[in-house]
Amino acid sequence: MVVTSDLRTGSVFKSGNDALFVQRILGQKTGRSGMVTRFRVRNIVTGQTSDIALDAGEKFEEVDLDIHQMKLSFVDGDTFVFMDQTSYEQYELTRDDLGDNTGYMSPDDDFELEITFYDGKPVGVTLPILVERTITYCEPGVKGDTSGKTFKPATLDTGIEVNVPLFCEIGTKIKLDTRDGTFAERVK
């Protein structure tokens, strides 16, 4: 059984008769009746995307999935093509299939990914916890105004925007935590 708090981007669970893939976590809200987490999910069978809200204690069935180690071969528009390193078969996933994970991947990367299959069809990807990216644009940091942890927005080589510490500059290589998209450390 899977509990709502275990669900992350890329998780797959069964709600009723539907196998759902978590594309994005939209937020959490605490109220009198407990915490509610909102997710953007995609039905694996029909491909339909919807937003749902789940209570913190809800339990769901796990879905039987096959997992294969692959590398991102190339990107063609909104289609990401992955290659199995043992059989050399290629599988395609769209930007919508991958959700927020697209901002952490580039064909130049040398790490292997776990591609999840449901009934022989690729449905999602699991990234390593830390990935390296390069900052392509950020404003210069202002010295002196650092009474706490101060961050600024930065655009990375894959096009996503994250918050980085003031000491980061254009061209700086950083490590990102793929679970929540936060800055982990500067690459030395």
Image: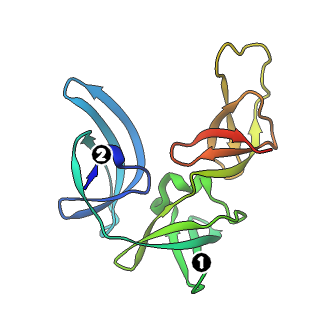
Taking the image as shown, residue 170 lies to the left or right of residue 5, namely: right
- The x, y position of residue 109, in whole percent, is 70, 62
- In screen coordinates, is 124 left or right of 28? right
Q: CA distance from mark 2 to mark 1?
A: 32 Å
Element at label 1? strand
Along the horizontal axis of the image, is 138 left or right of 45?
right
Q: Which residue is mark 2?
A: 4
Classify mark 2: residues with Cα within 10 Å, few (<14), some (14-19) or many (20+).
some
Quarter of the image where one finds residue 146: top right
Q: Give the residue drawn at x 36%, y 49%.
A: 7
At label 2, the amino acid type is: Thr
Q: Quadrant of the C terminus?
A: top right
Which residue is at a point 23% across and 30% down the rendered structure image?
A: 34
- Residue 93: % across, % down: 50, 69
* For residue 32, above or below residue 172: above
* Residue located at (79% from left, 42% from top): 172
Please state which amino acid type lies under the numbered disc 1: Met
The crowd level at tag 1 (other Cα within 10 Å; few <14, some 14-19, many 20+) is many
Observer-nearest of 153 and 54: 54
Q: Residue at x 56, y 64 (%)?
A: 78
Name the element at disc 2: helix
Q: Position of residue 82 (x, y in %)?
A: 58, 73
Quarter of the image with the N terminus in it: bottom left
Return the disc, 2 or 1, that comes first in the chain's sequence: 2
Residue 79 x %, y %: 56, 68
Residue 83: assigned label: 1
